[in-house]
Amino acid sequence: MKLLDDLLDLLLPQLCAGCGRSPALLCASCLAFLAGNTPRPAWPDPIPRGLPSPWAAASYEGPVRAAIVAHKERGRTPLAEPLGRALATAIRTAVTRPGVAVVPVPSSRAALRKRGHDPTRRMTVAAVHALRTSGAPVTGLDALYHRRRVADQAGLSQTARARNLAGALGVLPGAPVAGRDIILVDDVITTGATLSEAARTLRAAGARVQAAATVAATPKHHPSHPQ
């Protein structure tokens, strides 16, 4: 099926990943949904233990959701650039101290085999490039990996996601995280379980996790931390 999709992409003009109508990677209208917002806090309900302050550039709905899915599941890798620029706005808002390392949540080995690429890492590279071009003192850092298999998170409750991910991540040997200020990044925050486990893993290795940044958050999230 993926081979057929790739052949169709070569033979037919690609339409906007957001609306599927205009002959463009993302039309101006759909790009506005992605890039025309001020990043906002994206606390899930309930908040998992240890979740760093989460920021999202947009809501995971409409054209934004369609673009993320097209990049992640349908191999439209050029979308990493506009998605990365949106992620960069969330990272910039999340930073509380200069000189941070930006660490992506890694794809599992099974997901890498299925998709043929790591979408979050690809967006992170684009985001760090955009930030550095604008003069922001950030660096990208591949620091995490999957130590064991995890089940597909889709459809799992927050409790089930946390149980699925517990102990699943590790810090890559030699990754310089001890004493570093880190912003964790992912494409979407849903329950926050993945970001919480990633933060726990990095903190156990001596890192200071400032915050988390994502391209989008599911609409049910709180606009601010509940008191």
Image (cartoon, grey):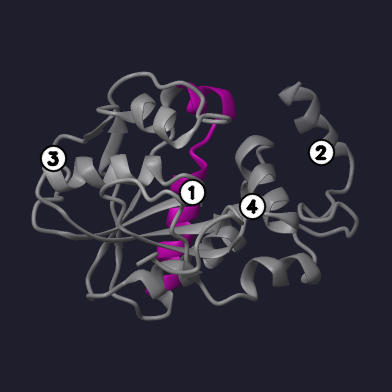
Q: How many neighbours does mark 1 have within 10 angstroms: few (below 14), some (14-19), or many (20 or more)?
A: some
Residue under pointer 2: 10
Q: How many neighbours does mark 4 have within 10 angstroms: few (below 14), some (14-19), or many (20 or more)?
A: few
Please tell me whether residue 144 is drawn above or below residue 221 in the rendered image.
Answer: above
Please tell me whether residue 175 is drawn above or below residue 90 in the rendered image.
Answer: above
Residue 224 location (% of width, % of height): 44, 69
Mark 2 → mark 3, Cα distance in angstroms: 41 Å
Could you tell me which secondary element the residue under label 2 belongs to? helix
Residue under pointer 4: 78
Pair 2/4: label in front: 4
Residue 115 magenta-highlighted:
yes
N-terminal of the two: label 2 or label 1? Answer: 2
The amino acid on which the numbered mark 3 sits, given as a three-letter code, is Gly
N-terminal of the two: label 2 or label 3? Answer: 2
State the predominant SS element of the stretch in magenta.
Answer: helix
Give me the residue at 49% from left, 28% from top.
112
Residue 210 magenta-highlighted:
no
Per the rendered image, the range of residues in magenta is: 110-132
Give me the residue at 69% from left, 44% from top.
70
Give me the residue at 64% from left, 35% from top.
73
Are dots 3 and 4 in contact, CB under 8 Å? no
- Residue 76 seen in this snapshot: no
Please tell me whether residue 47 is drawn above or below residue 197 in the rendered image.
Answer: below
The amino acid on which the numbered mark 1 sits, given as a three-letter code, is Arg
Residue under pointer 1: 122
The amino acid on which the numbered mark 4 sits, given as a three-letter code, is Pro
